[in-house]
Amino acid sequence: MYSRLPSRAIRANNVPLQSALTSALKSYRYKLNKPVMQSFRYISNTNEQKSVAPTMPPVAPVKNVGSDSTKTETNYLDTLTTKELLGYLVIGMATLNKPILSLVIKLFPYTPLWIIKALVYQNYCGGDNLPQVLKTGERLAERGIKNMMISYTVEACDGKQMSVSIPTIIKETERSISECLAPHTEKMINEAIAGVTDPAEIKTKINEIPPGYVALKPTGLIENAAEILLNYENPAYAEKFNELYTNCEKISEIAVKENARLRKLYPSRTSPFVVIVIDAERNDLQQGVYKLQRDLMAKFNRALYPNEKPQVGDACIVGTVQMYLKESTSVLAKDDALAKQGNYILGWKLVRGAYIHSEPDRGVIHDTKEDTDKCYDAGILKSIQNMNSENPTVGHLVVASHNGNTQLKATNLLTDLGSSSTAQEVRSNVVLGQLLGMADNITYDLIKNHNTKNIIKYVPWGPPLETKEYLLRRLEENGDAVRADSGWPLVKGILSTLTKRVF
């Protein structure tokens, strides 16, 4: 549903490119010596047949991003405001060890909201309203992070009573596109090209700005969402499932409209300006979510003109796949087959997963962290190879991870594609994503030491009570990651940074 200047001829018989990708992979090694929980992040998946992750060749070491450099750790703290540092100091104290973290999780629901907002809210949430989210986007831009994936954090899973109505959620999400993401993306592009006169450089800078993303939580877009997603194939629930689809469709139409408007202003852009992301849910609901995101991609991820074949950059709908599930590889293969059959192009957000602590059926999860890492890295590699092929079926990719090695592997793969027009199109359609407030040292390292520009942060926003519940879920589902990012090393670093500012 998105067009740009054609430059596909180079795809044909691109053997050197495939060789380069293979050679690039040989320079990497999967980091296998961290605790199993540490690398699991983000969102969830499903229940089909269990497939085995593809085997990957043995590869050479890759330097850990940020973790091997004390200078990088210190420098990233220097870029934060004093208020941000104080918020992270609180988090560092709360995550000194696992018993303390467990106690904090138990006490968190009883902590007054005003205390949370005063201490740590701004570190992890974008705000209560859209003007505050825009300010968060501007603050991220100061740190070299030029766009966001925003999410209105309200959901109605398992019949939970929400603080706002479904029509309000839809309206606020639509407003977040037209009044926040699209204007923010336009502003970032205008700032990037200000004072530039060379047409080639202007095109480069326009395409260096990542798209803005709106994450849709299916359980926040219809009442009794869990029951509907569990029974998505039951004819008795067809009307309700169609209502869920229609709600997502309405929001997606706003993104399409904004993409069309901005495309007229910046015709050399090779990626969307605004992208809709369907967030994953817990495993038992995920088959219904897959159905939802496939239906949306089939409608919106098409070439602008009838009978044309969609290409990289034509995907304005992105679906989430959790690679810690054994079925994830078969899910990607099924998506690929459906896209070929339906003549649309895929958008993927690949994550390791976040529901590992709450998943009751341990059999659906890869047996070891090594298996998960192999599956995840294979998904990234094959997606990038697909995007560079003569007939791509993947048109957009979000690498959602707090693992520094994963992010660096993806960055190096993109660099090794070369300087062809096809390679440039692919690079503008592969984006690295992390949660706001997490892995900031990795983000800093990628931007400062690897010149990474295609990086965003996931920014939740919305009613204070709902965002408080989001923070609790982050502690519960990403507690190990929070502790890995924080703890005593963070406390020492912050105290040292604050001391330097005072004296």
Image (cartoon, rainbow, N blue to C red):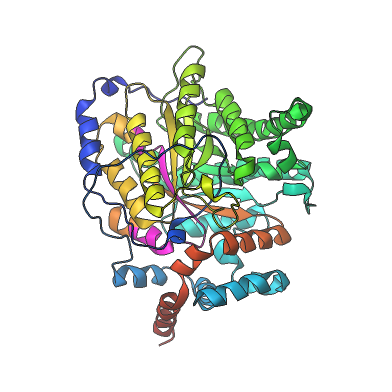
**Residue 59 place in picture, x, y as percent:** 23, 48
Q: Can see residue 81?
A: yes
Let me know if residue 256 is in the magenta part.
no
**Residue 49 place in picture, x, y as percent:** 52, 34
Q: Nearer the viewer, residue 186 or 358?
A: 358
Q: Is residue 294 above or below residue 427?
A: above
Q: Can see residue 265?
A: no
Q: Nearer the viewer, residue 91 or 76?
A: 91
Q: Is residue 162 left or right of residue 174?
A: right
Q: Residue at x 32, y 67 (%)?
A: 72
Let me know if residue 434 is in the magenta part.
yes
Q: The C terminus appears in which quarter of the rendering?
A: bottom left
Q: Residue at x 54, y 51 (%)?
A: 362
Q: Is residue 226 above or below residue 441?
A: above
Residue farthest along the bottom direction in this orientation: 503
Which of the 4 image quarters holds residue 417?
A: top left
Q: Residue at x 64, y 55 (%)?
A: 461
**Residue 473 place in picture, x, y as percent:** 62, 60
- Residue range in magenta is 425-445
**Residue 486 place in picture, x, y as percent:** 46, 71
